[in-house]
Amino acid sequence: MEYRKLDISYSFLDLDELLFRDRELMNMALEVLDNAYSPYSHFKVACAVRTKSGKVFLGTNQENIAYPSGMCAERVALFNAGTSKQKPTSLFIVAKDENDEFATAFPCGACRQVMMEFQTNISKQNIKVMVLTKEKKVVYFESVNDLLPFSFVF
């Protein structure tokens, strides 16, 4: 048997350490957070995606009583960018729980795979991923590869 170890890279940042462009992206996601449709989980998620052209696309989670017919905020924002043939370069995820307090929401597996396909086949460059935590810190990933090291790629 051969043993292998996988290391991923990520950083924790204070809000004042964010670049202006990243803080702007976070604020845009926060502005639409209350537009999330989450009557079942009461867990709101928003995502802002910046593209190579500088255009920003927004998304919020959209639940549906016919689960799993809803959609995560990350995919809403990415698919929105895709309809304009834009190439994502970064995205910022924010969330609030049922008590309307900040919550940490890392992307689900389906969203990670969609992010990977955008990175590999559409952007053809790393997509930076940032997640606001419940402690109001930012978890920063330089690439989707660090979120999904064993993805479906073609």
Image: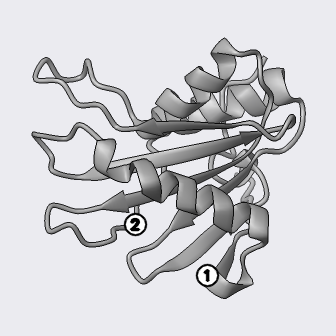
Q: Nearer the viewer, residue 109 or 48?
A: 48
Q: State which quarter of the image contains the C terminus.
A: top right
Residue 127 x, y percent position in the rendering: 77, 45
Query: Of the numbered discs in the image, which one, if any, rests on residue 15?
Result: 1
76 displayed left or right of 101: right
Which of the two discs, 1 and 2, labels the residue nearer the N terminus? 1
Q: Residue at x 37, y 59 (%)?
A: 95
Label 2: element kind = loop
Residue 43: x and y, percent? 23, 52
**Observer-nearest residue: 65 or 35?**
35
Judge whether residue 14 can be spotted in this image.
Answer: no
Question: As shown in the figure, which amino acid type bears the numbered disc 1?
Answer: Leu
Amino acid at pointer 2: Thr
In this view, 5 is above or below 83: below
At label 2, counting other C-alpha atoms closer than 10 Å, the crowd grade (few under 14, some 14-19, many 20 or more) is many
Which residue position is annotated with label 2? 104
Residue at image location 76% in from the left, 15% down from the top: 85
